Image (cartoon, helix red, strand yellow):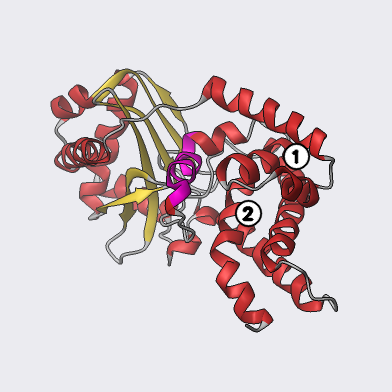
Amino acid sequence: MTRVEEFEELRPLLFSIAYRILGSVSDAEDAVQDTWLRFEATSTEPASAKAYLSAAITRISIDVLRSARVRREQYVGPWIPEPLLTDPYQDPERSAQLADSLSMAALLLLERLTPLERAVFVLREVFGFGFPEVASAVGRTEAACRQLAVRARRHMDAGRPRFEADRREREELAGRFLDAFREGDVDALRELLAADVHLVGDGGGKAPLFANFFNGPQNVLGVLAALGTRFALLGVECEPHQVNGQPGAIFRDRDGKVLSTVALDVLDGQIQTIRAVVNPDKLGHMGPVADAWALNRAATQEGR
């Protein structure tokens, strides 16, 4: 097998590691490319391409995360990870760990960890790497990595999100929610929202819609009703889709351009959290992006 073939075979794993460490599709893709450049440039043949590349992507991701933390402190409004529609890496033996770690709620929990804790947790708990491999990847002793893993696991377990166990039930409830939203059925929406529901919108100061934090059924209902009316005026289409392994949707304008993604946390037969990403910088990997500001102006004019 050539070096290129080895790399391409491992690319899905490398991207999945980087995405969970970084919470960004674009940064993860850049990290994968940087990893390839290092692999291509090395004059020695690694004993294990998987070990070498996993260590390289981890170190690159840790460095990127440290600089990204500074940028996120200056971020305008709520920050949500870049939405991922499909995880390219699949492992039947670790499907539960991979799915749990992909949700928006889990990625936001990972944000609370230090970069080293996050990397160790991802490698050990999500992908099942042995401590010798983890230690080599992060440049720490095995004993130090075990301590990092314990601390990371403690933080994650304390805030670990719970979701409806039955995927079919989650999808059915999400479908009812999206239908009610499209139809402007406020009563149906009210029945589906939890008493402590909250809606979080990530616009990054670059989009007007959804871009805020709203808590409680009445506040969330008010936002949903207003948006439903505007979307109907503008012909915005709601396309049900898995987002980070959770039920959700992609919203597109009349031309099919991506306006927003929405991911739904479902528990006890109700919608607990609605997370919307509207920042155009976080949507480009899904195709052409709609101009949310122009749509907002058009909706205002239409509504007069």
Question: Circle 1 sits in a helix, a strand or a loop, which is it?
Answer: helix
* Residue 189 x, y percent position in the rendering: 20, 29
Residue 297 in view, yes or no? no
Residue in view at x 41 percent, y 41 percent? 276
* Residue 122 x, y percent position in the rendering: 62, 43
Q: Main secondary structure of the magenta part?
A: helix
Residue in view at x 72 percent, y 66 percent? 48
Residue in view at x 62 percent, y 23 percent? 154
Residue 244 in view, yes or no? yes
- At label 2, the amino acid type is Ala
Q: Are marks 2 and 1 in contact (CB under 8 Å)?
A: no
Q: How far apart are marks 2 and 1 (CA)?
A: 13 Å
* Quadrant holding the N terminus: bottom right
State the extent of the magenta-drawn residues as a range: 93-105
Task: Tell me the residue that label 1 is attached to.
Answer: 116
Going from N to C along the chain, the mark reached first, 2 or 1, is: 2
Q: Nearest the camera: 140 or 244?
A: 140
